[in-house]
Image (cartoon, rainbow, N blue to C red):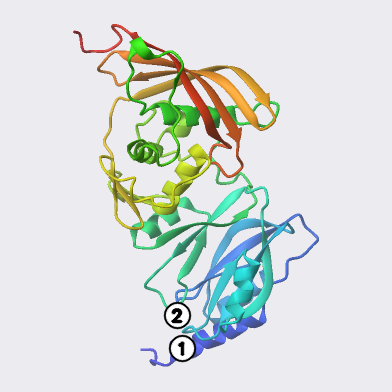
Amino acid sequence: MKPAWRPHILSALMALLVCLAVPSVASAAESVTMYRLYNPWTGEHLYTASEKEYSSLPAYGWLAEGAAWTAPIKSQTPVWRLYNPYAPGGDHHYTTSEQEYDQLQTIGWEGEGIAWYSDDEKGTALQRLFNPYAATGAHHYTANLDECSSLIARGWCYEGVAWYGIDTGDAAQDFDWEIDENGFNRTAAEDLVLLYTAWIPGYDESSTTDVNVMRRPGGDTTRDEELIYSMIYKTFASGRETLNYPNNAYGLVYAELDDFVNFFVPSETGRQIISSIYGSCPSNLSQFSGTYLTYVGDGWRMGMADGPFGRNIKTSNWQTSGDSVTFDAEVTYSDGIADSTVASYRVEVQRDDESLFGCHLTSIVRTQVRTLVGSGLVRN
């Protein structure tokens, strides 16, 4: 049986060694492998670009966990590292904010300089999570969405993207994206239209000419609740690879709570969805709660059910003017029971690097709706 004092002495030695071995990023390569270690005495994960630091710390009790992501050797976005000598066993913090880096040093943290760099091309997102019950190692960073989902299900709070690693393509699923000659992702723009038009009410064929169906974010809270729900819902668009659960083509963070039926969607994920669709998001997210989502303070609980839903889209007449892209879209909706409905739209989107889709909606006008009589199982 280990003496009660041993973990504290060992943790202090481990923290001191880490503090003295701040990694420096070499300039001889275009990228650097980022390594991850775990301190079983304090619960802290350490991230380092130094192979020497990574290979030496296991001799002092740290557990080597391998490569975590790939960082650029240099970029416009440094990641700063700090050390807290007052936390039990010592603790480290990482930030892309130089203001936060400077501020923490005024309250006792020790600045350790630039540890690595974030990818300005935003290739692979490193997600940040917070454990409100931990005294040390309260923050965790991971590019693995399954790990992120598992931690959220166990009570960790999702805090959004911390920084980015280089997209090496190792973990990416090979989706068949259609990219135009200007680098614009047409498949993602189609997904945006499918998502937004799925919940438009009033398919009244007598009043379908030039109906502007665009809303402002928060202007229709039920609609926005449905939009968040649809990005997670596993049969939202059967047959649409990029919108079909569990492919998660857009790298969303959420937790599967039990048997793929009940899910938890963090507030930050909901904010990301709404901002990606509209270009902005209201500050009060609790208003998006009702039929499909139940807001529980830091996110939503939602349930799923299988269904024979099908949503397909055909697009044409693509035109680009600066950051504005316009096109015509024909959306077919079927549920396998009632007759299918086909709606036509004129769509305008704005390029947006912060959007999941690479663009957000600026205008969407419904020009026609028609019913494919006899396409459903139900007969009048």
Q: Looking at the image, which residue is at 48% across and 33% down?
A: 242
Q: Secondary structure at mark 2?
A: loop
Which residue is located at x 33 percent, y 47 percent? 287
Please give left or right for residue 273 compared with residue 123 in the image.
left
Residue 102 vertical position relative to residue 119 in the rendered view, above or below: below
Image quarter (top left, top right, bottom left or bottom right) of the N terminus? bottom left
Residue 13 or 292: which is nearer the viewer? 292
User: Which residue was labeled with disc 2?
Assistant: 41
Q: Amino acid at mark 2?
A: Trp
Q: Amino acid at mark 1?
A: His
- Horizontal arrangement in the rendering, residue 202 relative to residue 192 (left or right): left
Q: Position of residue 186 (x, y in %)?
A: 58, 27
Which of these two is toward me, 34 or 369? Answer: 369
Q: Which mark is residue 226?
A: none
Q: Quadrant of residue 28?
A: bottom right
Tag shown at residue 8: 1
Q: Is 105 positioned to the left or the right of 2 in the image? A: right
Which residue is drawn at the image coordinates 57% and 63% (left, top)?
A: 66
Q: Does residue 226 sit above or below 334 in this rendering?
A: below
- Residue 97: percent from the left, percent from the top? 62, 65
Q: In this orientation, does residue 175 appear? A: no
Question: x%, y% of residue 264?
Answer: 33, 51
